Image (tube, grey):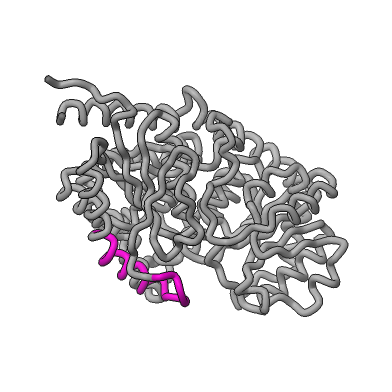
Amino acid sequence: MERELKASEIHILVLPYPVQGHLNPMLQFSKRLALKGLRVMLLAAMSISESIPDQAGSVKIQRICDGFDGDGKVDSLVYHERFSVVVPQSLREVVARQNCSNCPFNFLVYDSTLPWALDVAHRLGLDAAPFFTQSAVVSALYYHVHRGTLKMPVEGPTVTVPSMPLLAVSDLPSFIHHMDAYPSILRLVVDQFSNIHDANWTFINTFEQLENEVLSWMRSQWPVKTVGPIIPSMYLDKRLEDDRDYGLSLFKPNLDACQTWLDQKQAASVVYVSFGSLASLGEEQMEEISQGLKRSNAHFIWVVRESEQQKLPTNLVEETTDKGLVVNWCNQLQVLAHQAVGCFLTHCGWNSTLEALSLGVPMAAMPQWTDQTTNSKFIADVWKVGLRVKRDESGIVRGEEIALCIREIMEGERGNEIRKNAHRWKELAKEAVDEGGSSNKNIEEFVAELAEVEGDAS
């Protein structure tokens, strides 16, 4: 007899790619599913197991073999290829073990960069859906390359793409406008769409109001559900009790040092500087950033990973004791949420962009590569929540330009308008994930549809 399953009878398996910018949003999405009553297990690669707890809120975490032990530095493409060879077998073993229990898996949510996971899931008798950790705009651009409607190599100074503003070639993701420099990575991001039409659901970490035009176009091609912004609940709707951080960090944050230092500063007087977990800047660029921070005359927190510390200018820390704090890592959300922070000098990775939008923090956009160039275009010209720093002919952002942007955001007339826009997007982000919001509704609809489908199957 057909019946609809209860939410508590549905068991979801989540497979993220093990880098910080993919782990965090997929774990937060897992928490959102668990909030609806589903059982959720997230798979964590053994190579990062030292950073991973057994439980994150109501989400169980299961370690799986990924072919590496975590010792030594491995090229990212080599790792991805090895991961895609080893993990399918690990996935089959996890599903087989669970099938012997009284609570087998019903569904797999997988990182969109792992399209093979959909085929593996289908062979195991599971339905599955990709989770996109990049913006809708960037996803659509890669899809156009996949479909051939965005011809490669891209010619001309600008490109016209359906549902998007006119884009300069330099606004495109670096894998597209510098295709010869990243052929393997371009193939990887384009292959996200190799079997997209075989999926009945597609999740994307954005929200309706932020990218409504491109989302409407995407829905004409395949089913899309917005579920973002995916950041800890206590910074948005506060419906997940004590959900103040992601729960997974591949780096050890300097929590107390940052918080204590910020507590001593006036409102909107601090520039927070961070270029994410992967970016690597040259010594000349590090020197220019330090000069820009000095010239801005603003207080600053600068996150410089331990592996990058040797590139810092000599005596920077001593010369800026009264103005700045340099740390290896920090709780970015906690810093951005602090009233003392008035500007975020950022590479514009999608997670960082969503965090700043959700907390209403103006951005000085300094993109490095991948999707960051596209995100910075929208930050400055579409959402109008920041300024994009200019590079010189050698590709370096000079200190004078950095200082100019910081001062304009924190003191100038444009800064007032930017802050108003940032506050507006903050409210819209909260609205999207709260009761009755578009992202919350999409998650509820998915749970209801899955309960009905699985109930019919049983």
Q: Nearer the viewer, residue 442 or 210?
A: 442
Q: Tell me where the magenta segment starts and ends, as one range.
A: 69-88
Can residue 148 be seen here? The reply is no
**Position above or below: 287 against 85:** below
Q: Nearer the viewer, residue 243 or 154?
A: 243
Q: Position of residue 244 (x, y in %)?
A: 60, 41
Q: Main secondary structure of the magenta part?
A: helix
Q: Quadrant of residue 47?
A: bottom left
Q: Is residue 76 magenta?
A: yes
Question: Which image quarter is the C terminus in?
Answer: top left
The residue drawn where x is 42% and y is 39% is 213
Q: Residue at x 49, y 34 (%)?
A: 209
Residue 14 point in image, percent of width and height: 35, 47
Residue at 27% across, 31% down:
450
Picture coordinates of residue 408 (x, y %)? 76, 53
Residue 315 highlighted magenta (yes or no): no
User: What is the residue that sits farthest to the left in this orientation?
Assistant: 1
Q: How many marks can you see?
A: 0
Foreground residue among 279 and 408: 279
Q: At which x and y percent is residue 174? A: 45, 66
- The quadrant in which the N terminus is found is top left
Name, please, the residue furthest toward the right. Answer: 322
Report whether residue 282 is seen.
yes
| Residue 451 image-quadrant placement | top left
Q: Nearer the viewer, residue 86 or 187?
A: 86
Q: Is residue 447 left or right of residue 387?
A: left
Using the image, determine if residue 369 lies above or below residue 94. below
Q: Which residue appears at 21% of the width and 31% of the height?
A: 454
